[in-house]
Image (cartoon, rainbow, N blue to C red):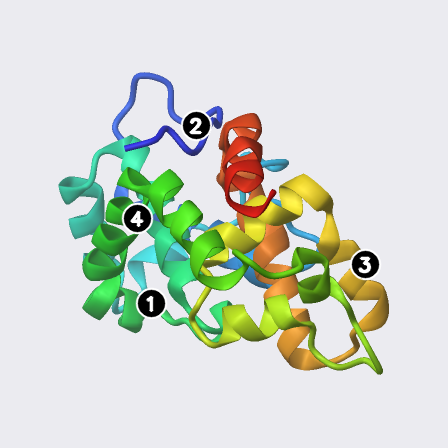
Amino acid sequence: MLNLIQLTIITINMKVTPHDTYKTYLAMKQHFTNDTYDFIRYNGKIKASIQSFHKRKDRLFFERLSRQKKDEDIINFFVANFVASSDPSSLWVGEIIQNGDEKYLEWKKKFESLTYLFEQDLINVFQGKNFLDFLKVENKKHPKILKEYLSGNLMIETMVILDKMINYKNKFDQKLLDPIWELTSKKIKKYSPFLEVDINKYKNIVRKVLL
């Protein structure tokens, strides 16, 4: 699996505790739903007392997670679940308890073949067509690239990687004022710091497929 997340973890030669796991969950939820909170900038720090943690009915989940997952996997586990959610603001811990491992496994499998899946996205959606046409915003209507993503024809990872290349998101932000794009734009922005890729390798894939 790719080493996606390069962070200074708050533990130093110490096992992540259930309380730490709980705080990571809260910080990750803030990151994906709050415009002003940045998980990486604040190194995942967030206020959450041990007393409030012990009062939670779901604390056993965080205790189990801290035992079952390696410390370095816990952040990725929550990233995978918030990215997989159609609306991270509505994702609650009960859903993660029920489906979290499945979402995390799907996410890891995707990254084992990310370059291949990215290339297939390009081939299936863009090959033989004018790529610039997919980026046009006319009369404040959704551009083709967004329609393809919403239809399930493009991975969120493809959307993020392409934005790293051509910075289309900021242009759309200026022209689109609807909740669907706002939700997608936020997900691209919030996911991007966790998606560390060799951008030159992906540019070469774009050249091979589209040029």
- Disc 1 from disc 2: Cα separation: 22 Å
Which mark is first along the chain, 3 or 2?
2
Which mark is first along the chain, 4 or 3?
4
Q: Nearer the viewer, mark 4 or mark 1?
A: 4
Q: Indicate the secondary structure of the residue bearing disc 2.
A: loop
Q: Nearer the viewer, mark 2 or mark 3?
A: 3
Q: Dot 3: within a 10 Å radius of its alpha carbon, few (fewer than 14), some, or many (20 or more) residues?
A: few
Q: Nearer the viewer, mark 3 or mark 1?
A: 3
Q: Residue at the front extreme?
A: 128
> Vertically, is 127 above or below 148?
above
Q: Amino acid at mark 4?
A: Lys
Q: Is residue 24 left or right of residue 202?
A: left
- Disc 3 from disc 1: Cα separation: 34 Å
- Disc 2 from disc 4: Cα separation: 24 Å
- Disc 2 from disc 3: Cα separation: 34 Å
Q: Nearer the viewer, mark 2 or mark 4?
A: 4
Question: Residue 210's spot in the image, x, y percent?
Answer: 57, 47
Q: Is residue 34 left or right of residue 65?
A: right
Q: What residue does disc 2 label?
A: 9
Q: What residue does disc 3 label?
A: 171
Q: Amino acid at mark 3?
A: Lys
